[in-house]
Image (cartoon, grey):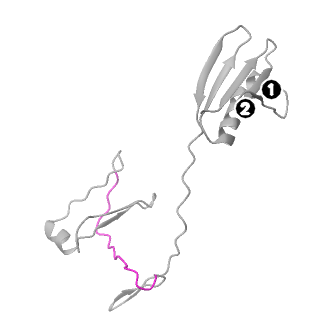
């Protein structure tokens, strides 16, 4: 059941507030100008949508559902970056788990994602046959997509 915030506005503009039919205490006397801040605070504290009913002194009633602001997702855990060392015979890098499969991704092109977040790159079938796992990595989002080839 959705929490209920009931606000009764007196003729002098002061507010009486209940949360789930229990008196809601504030640090000070609340007036009409405090209503938005009050409701936003309750919604933020509860972290869930809240039904708000405002009963005016003239007998009119307004009802709304207020939802909490979307919070950005927790950033991914920080990855430890180890320096790769290049030589005439190839490349090497550490920090992997023993026995871990390490994918080698070579950047051959860059694309800008469209309005729906889709990035597309056409590759010759021979390239995909020789390299069945192509990885697309979002430089800002950290999102990645791996082709479904078989190897």
Query: Which label sits on residue 111?
Result: none
- Helix, strand or loop status at disc 2: helix
Q: Residue at x 70, y 16 (%)?
A: 55
Q: Are marks 2 and 1 in contact (CB under 8 Å)?
A: yes
For mark 1, does the 10 Å Cα neighbourhood hold few (<14), some (14 to 19), or many (20 or more) residues? some
Say which quarter of the image contains residue 49: top right
Task: List the single residue furthest toward the front.
Answer: 1
Residue beneath disc 2? 38
The segment highlighted magenta reads 97-113
Q: Position of residue 61 (x, y in %)?
A: 65, 14
**Residue nearer the viewer, 69 or 138:** 69
Q: Residue at x 70, y 30 (%)?
A: 20
Q: CA distance from mark 2 to mark 1?
A: 9 Å
Q: In this image, 73 relative to 113: left or right?
A: right
Q: Which mark is residue 30?
A: 1
Q: Measured along the vertical axis of the image, is residue 89 above or below residue 103?
A: below
Residue 34 visible to the viewer: no
């Amino acid at each position: 059941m959705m929490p209920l915030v009931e606000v009764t506005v007196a003729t002098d503009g002061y507010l009486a507030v209940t949360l789930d039919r229990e008196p809601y205490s504030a640090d000070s006397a609340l007036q009409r100008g405090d209503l938005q801040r009050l409701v936003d605070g309750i919604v933020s504290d509860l972290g869930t949508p809240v039904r708000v009913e405002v009963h005016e002194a003239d007998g009119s009633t307004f009802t709304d559902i207020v939802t909490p602001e979307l919070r950005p997702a927790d950033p991914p855990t920080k990855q430890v970056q180890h320096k790769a060392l290049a030589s005439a015979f190839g490349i090497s890098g550490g920090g992997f788990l023993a026995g871990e499969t390490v994918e080698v991704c070579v950047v051959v092109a860059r694309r800008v994602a469209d309005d729906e977040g889709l990035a597309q790159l056409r590759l010759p079938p021979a390239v995909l046959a020789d390299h069945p796992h192509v990885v697309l990595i979002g430089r800002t989002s950290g999102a990645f997509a791996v082709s479904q080839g078989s190897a």
